[in-house]
Image: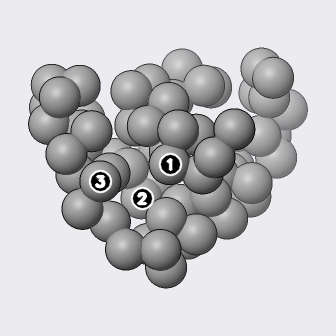
Amino acid sequence: MDDENIICGLAYRCPYNDRLGTCSLFYMEGKSFTEKLVLVEEMDEQGKAEILQQHANCKNKLNGYEKW
């Protein structure tokens, strides 16, 4: 699965059911999925890499809330 698909899934909904205010995708809360897709498509590679890194180090995961 490519990174953009993963980020689209993360943008759709937090896999931990609790998007933290410190999440790079928090600003997308309340937007339609179509709007979220457009925002993801507009991201540069560095921004995408930062989101994936932040997800890997998410406090939800580190606090034992990992769902997948």
Residue with the most extreme bottom position: 46
**Which quarter of the image is occupied by the C terminus?**
top right
Asked whether 26 or 51 is in front, the reply is 51
- From the image, state whether disc 2 or disc 3 is nearer to you: 3
Residue 26 x, y percent position in the rendering: 33, 47
Q: Is residue 67 left or right of residue 31?
A: right
The residue sitting at 82% across, 46% down in the picture is 62
- Mark 2 lies on residue: 24
Q: Is residue 56 left or right of residue 14?
A: right
The residue sitting at 27% across, 39% down in the picture is 37
| Secondary structure state at the residue bearing disc 3 | helix
Residue with the most extreme front position: 2
- Mark 1 lies on residue: 4
Precedes in sequence: disc 2 or disc 1? 1
Number of numbered callouts drawn: 3
Q: Answer above or below: position of 64 versus 41.
A: above
| Secondary structure state at the residue bearing disc 2 | loop
**Whether residue 47 is visible:** yes
Q: Amino acid at mark 2?
A: Ser
Residue 52 x, y percent position in the rendering: 62, 58
Asked whether 2 or 39 is in front, the reply is 2
- Mark 3 lies on residue: 41
Q: Amino acid at mark 3?
A: Glu
The residue sitting at 14% across, 36% down in the picture is 35
Q: Count neighbours of disc 2 (C-alpha within 10 A) and say few if under 14, some if 14 to 19, many if 20 or more.
A: some
| Secondary structure state at the residue bearing disc 1 | helix
